[in-house]
Amino acid sequence: MAEASTSSRPPLNLDEEVRLWSNNSERERQENFATLYGLIVSLEYLERAYVRDSVSSKEYAPACIKLLAQYKSLIKLLHDDLDNPPYKTANSMKGLEGFMQRYRMDYPAALHRLIVGVPATVEHSAEAGEGGEELGKWVAETTQGSQEWEGRGKILHWLIELNGMKASDEISEEQSRQASLIRLQLLWPFPHA
């Protein structure tokens, strides 16, 4: 009986091209997924090179900014596909983490950088309260003036916080009050009692 079922199938042609899509929209989705995969791998290797000091911060920052910008543009095209993946299983996650899980991508540095949304040079200068060159690029419109301006770290903290949010996310009442206080302090830079 096993022979009957195998003989009813057409023979497997190993020279035949396998199609991953059947129409243009499926082809476009697969190409976008391939681009996303490549961006994640590139960002992981860039992060590792920066940590190992194989890439200077002057080379790292523009390359990272470019990859993050490409990711943000691409994610707008893939938003629906990542939230409702065609590869969904019973225990699969949605979004970027789900994509990385599905394709067994173990790239923690890239995932962190994509979640934070800014280069490490900006992230760490905000944590340390430093005024670096990359810092000025990211907040130039807001921080016209001294490199040692005290509000710079607060602005960078909010930039990182907001970059980590989705468009549908809402800030809490406490976050709203904190942002209002910071805005007041920035507009009225006199000592507060």
Image (cartoon, helix red, strand yellow):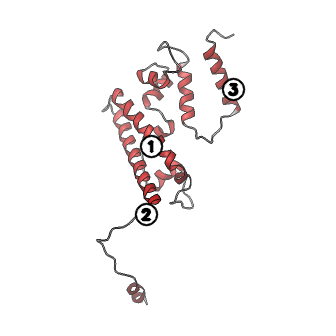
Mark sitting earlier along the chain (3/2): 2
Q: Taking 13 as reference, is 101 left or right?
A: right
| Residue 39 appears left or right of 155 | left
SS category of the residue bearing label 2 = loop
Name the residue carrying label 1.
108
Identify the residue position indicated by label 3 in the image: 177
Badge 3: residue crowd in 10 Å (few <14, some 14–19, many ≥20): few
Compared to residue 155, the image places residue 112 above or below, namely below
**x, y percent for residue 109:** 43, 40
- Residues at marks 1 and 3 touching, judged by CB atoms closer than 8 Å: no
> Which residue type carries mark 2?
Trp
- How many angstroms separate mark 1 from mark 3 (CA)? 33 Å
SS type, badge 1: helix
Residue at 42% of width from left, 28% of height from top? 121
Number of on-image labels: 3
Examine the image and state in which quarter residue 12 appears.
Answer: bottom left
Helix, strand or loop at mark 3: helix
Looking at the image, tell me whether mark 2 or mark 1 is earlier in sequence order: 2
Residue at numbered disc 2:
21
Amino acid type, mark 1: Pro
Q: Residue most toward the left?
A: 15
Amino acid type, mark 3: Arg
